[in-house]
Image: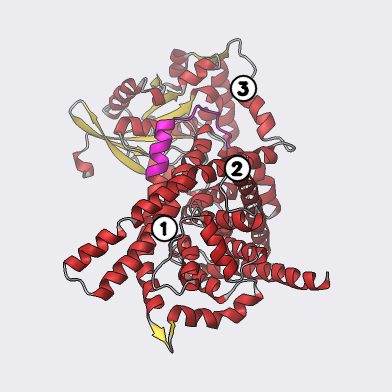
Amino acid sequence: MPESVYAATVALAGNPNVGKSTVFNALTHLHQHTGNWTGKTITCTSGTVRWKQQDICLVDLPGTYALQSHVAEEKITREFLQSNTADCIIVVVDATCLERNLIFVLQVLSITRRVVLCLNLMDEAAKKHIQIDIPKLCEQLNIPVIPCAAAKGKGLNELMLAAISVAQRADMDKNDCWPITSTPELVSQAEQIAKTVVSFGNTQPNRDRKIDQIVTSRRLGIPIMLMLLAIVLFITIVGANIPSEWLSQLLFSFTAPMDAALHYIGAPEWLCALLIDGVWKVLASVVSVMLPPMAIFFPLFTCLEDVGYLPRIAFNLDHLFCKARACGKQALTLCTGFGCNAAGVVGCRIIDSTRERMIAILTNTMVPCNGRFPAIISLITLFIVGTAQQSWKSSFLAALSLTAVIILSVCMTLIASWILSHTAFKGMPSAFFLELPPYRKPQFAKIIVRSLRDRTWFVLLRAVCVAAPAGAIIWLLGNLHWDGQSLLTVFAGGLDPFAQWIGLDGMILLAFILGFPANEIVIPLVLMGYLSAGSLVELNHLTDLAQLLNANGWTPVTAVCFILFSLFHWPCSTTCLTIHKETGSWKWTIFGMIFPTLFGIVLCFAVHMVATYGFLIG
């Protein structure tokens, strides 16, 4: 809707974690994602509020702590406020920690007086026995103050009424601002105002502080984090087994009807084979392998985010990233990378320093994304746990082994960050200010909707888009022949000498290369090559997979090298395009492909040499 048709423009501003986006969603009925860490909202988002037969433009500004620095989020907010674009600014604050929020309120008031204070989270303040004298706060700031509980829809009508009233006041001079001359004076005034309007009742011991003394302690913080990770992975592994098999059977059951339909309309044989054996079987394999674990992992991961635990992970890992001369916020982008590396690369925008943001982008792909988990889990179960039978015990051991793999990937990410910070991106780490939000009861309905729509569907759609053309290419390589051999076999033979040096074989290495569009199709590609099949192969049981791999010379060393190379090799095509978009450079995109691959080659070579010559010496 063009800006000219709006009756007024109202902007939402405030610190992170005060419920600003919740207010925005409730007023506009849009589904702006609510995050639990700094800078989750990177750009301004606008929506329309229908108010008494009028359309009001509501702008959601990035969450910021201050307006003086040159951080991207704060610069956007500051420039918007100084432009006088908005007729009214709603500053959202957390009623449970008013004093800290008041510093930002006074900064906004130093720019404009067209301000309404939204005193959000009043329900949580009541639970903590915090009382705020609202009339006195109005008098002190000389602006309207509206108590709200946005998550429950309380106070929003009163908030809009006050905002429209301020927006329509013609007698208010925008240059009539709060007289502040320095930052110390600003802090002093915020403290003085808070002392006069905030009082505390008979409060019980702070629950959040007591929990944080355990989950963020030096002795227990990281073990608890690893335990929660193992639990999430265990639930994902156990829960995805049966749905994945059902989905695979369902999708592959469409093969015969689709083939019959194509023949019925007179499609040539080669086109039928290309579409069914190539495109459809690849799509079916990718969807059946990816969808069940994603549908479980993402809601669990989002639940930890909604509760407020992810910032605690960043807090626990902050000192490790600082030792690597990287930014502690990189821990947050690393967590996002476990779901999707492309999303993790985009998440690096929350890092203010260009140097540290580049380090985070170039190392994010060293943690396994969801597309790599199924193959890693299967090989761990077969060659490390040592069983093809699905049971809670094997799943538990697989979860512990997968946790160890993830720990290795995090350690390698730290080492890679240290190398980059001492070579291409020299410099000292910047200060990392992280707010630990209060623990909140997760909103399960919103978690399911958000995780399935914003994450599962996004990643699945990406995989489908790249898997379809990949399926056609794979079919052509499997069906076009040279000297009596398929091109797939010919290319694999050319790669075999180098692959043997790193504990793999030519077919495995070729599968990784052809799996560039999507990591999910690497194992199916290996099977297709081993069976010399003209189409992608789907095995329904781990026992079948174990027999085929053993028949082609696989050993536990091969499985370990496969897992290592799966962890550390070039990112998928979508992530590469995302790296280019974020860095604006093909040079750094190519570097982002080569750098992790070097780690994989070195680690696989070392494992292969130790296994080969260690056994010979022994």
The answer to whether residue 190 is visible is yes
Q: Residue at x 54, y 20 (%)?
A: 193
Quadrant in which the C terminus is drawn = bottom right
Check residue 44 for magenta coloring: no
Q: Nearer the viewer, residue 409 or 96?
A: 409
Residue type of the residue flagged with mark 3: Arg
Q: Residue at x 45, y 78 (%)?
A: 488
Q: Which residue is mark 3?
A: 207
Element type at mark 1: helix
Element type at mark 3: helix
Q: Nearer the viewer, residue 363 or 474?
A: 474
Q: Residue at x 67, y 35 (%)?
A: 216
Span of residues in magenta: 433-453
The answer to whether residue 42 is visible is no
Q: Residue at x 58, y 24 (%)?
A: 191
Check residue 450 for magenta coloring: yes
Q: Residues within 10 Å of mark 1 (few under 14, many from 20)?
A: many
Q: Position of residue 5 (x, y in %)?
A: 19, 39
Query: Residue 229 shows which numbered tag?
Result: 2
Q: Examine the rendered structure and indicate whether residue 260 appears above or below residue 200.
A: below
Inter-mark Cα distance, 2 to 1: 24 Å
Q: Position of residue 564 (x, y in %)?
A: 62, 62
Front of the two marks 2 and 1: 1
Q: Which residue is mark 1?
A: 286
